[in-house]
Image (cartoon, grey):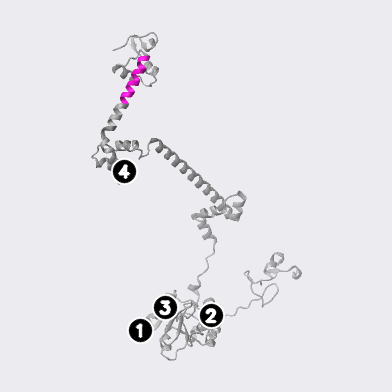
Amino acid sequence: MNQPVTKTVTFLKKNGAVHWRKCAEFYGVKQGKTAKEWDRCGAPLFDPVEMKLWLENRQREWLRKISDKSGHYADKEDEIVRLYKSERMGLRAISHYFSGRPTMPGVRLILIRREVYRGEKVFEKQKQDSRARRALIIANEKRHRHEAAVCLWQLRKGAGVETTCKANGWNLKSIWNYLSKRASYRHFIARRQRIWPAKRKYGNNYSRKFPKESAFKAYLISLLHEARIDFVEECRLPNSRTRIDFKLADGTFIECKVALNSGQTYEAIGQAMHYGKHSKKVVLCVPDDIEMRKDLHELFVAMGVTVCNQLILISFLKDELALLPSNAIVEQQKVLFICKCCGSNEKRRHRMNSYCVECAPLIPKMTFDYVLNRWMRNAENHT
């Protein structure tokens, strides 16, 4: 029922009826239907003093109902806390454990009240911290991308990464760590590097049957087993860390090589000198599809080392005549170098073709002779 209008709140009526919107705004709410609901509950809308007490009692009653509702599961709270802390069960699992009573939001409120679950304030703070960390990571990523792009662009123009970082005051190590992982940098390096032909594919000093020494050793092991020759693989020499590929029962050493280029051959010569102090019979076994320089073969013969391939190895071990085929020994290719500047054939060639190591640094001070088509010193320039 409508209350009698007092003198202080007469503006809450309009044409003899209650103005619900004005009444709601007067008591600090936004919608007029709220004031209408209050009137249906018997609220003293036209007495501000009584209305204030009525609202306080209503709020107190509402909180009491909430507390009573939250206390419905007081006997389950200890078990809920135990399941969450000890059993590591989630909110949904705990609710299902009690057949849906309390519900998942109810379980969450109980855990918050017992201070074992994060509340709204803690949750909001964690979200803010997460957003701040994510924003910092995104900002650092953008900065790294910009710095790497600038360094790569300057690198394409010929300026080094170190020069660009020093000019801009950037951290060189962090930029290299980021730049080296980028596909654009790897593609740039791959395009810039010159692809040289593989010596193993085109050279006669490399075996095509046995690209790896392990495969060649496995083949020799099978041959020695078929011939019933006792041996020790990777035998260690006394008082030394050196290991010989095969040591036979009679003290013969067998060393395997699948390449006879200059580097591998001189390494084999050094090993043979070492093996000669521990054995009187040293054999260098190589595949039958590679060639050996004649001068290097003569060095092995002078040292008392026998060179053979896998086809004649067993015959040699059985004291039969077995020599390396003549077509496997080739003459040394002699390359005559004469410096274009000083004409000497005794000095070492510089990496810049046709000039020795002494004349090549002087090229910037030379004059190019178009008749002879080469650089010449100023004193030797013929005009």
Among all residues in the image, which is located at the extreme bottom?
320
- Specify which label sits upstream in the sequence, 4 or 1: 4
Residue 200 in picture, x, y percent from top left: 49, 73
Q: Earlier in the sequence, mark 3 or mark 4?
A: 4
Q: Are marks 4 and 2 in contact (CB under 8 Å)?
A: no
Q: Residues within 10 Å of mark 4 (few under 14, many from 20)?
A: some
Residue on which the image places disc 1: 226
Disc 1 versus disc 2: nearer the observer: 2
Specify whether 64 is left or right of 312.
left
Disc 3 + disc 4, Cβ < 8 Å: no
Which residue is identified by label 2?
A: 270
> What's the mark number on residue 84?
4
Above/below status of 122 relative to 265: above
- Residue 50 belongs to the span the image colors magenta: yes
Percent from the top left, x then y, of residue 155? 58, 55
Inspect this view and state whether residue 20 appears. Answer: no
Is 71 in front, or is 135?
71
Q: Quadrant of residue 61?
A: top left
- The local secondary structure at tag 2 comes to helix
* Mark 3 or 4: the one toward you: 4
Q: Which residue is mark 3?
A: 217
At 30% from the left edge and 43% from the top edge, which residue is drawn?
A: 82
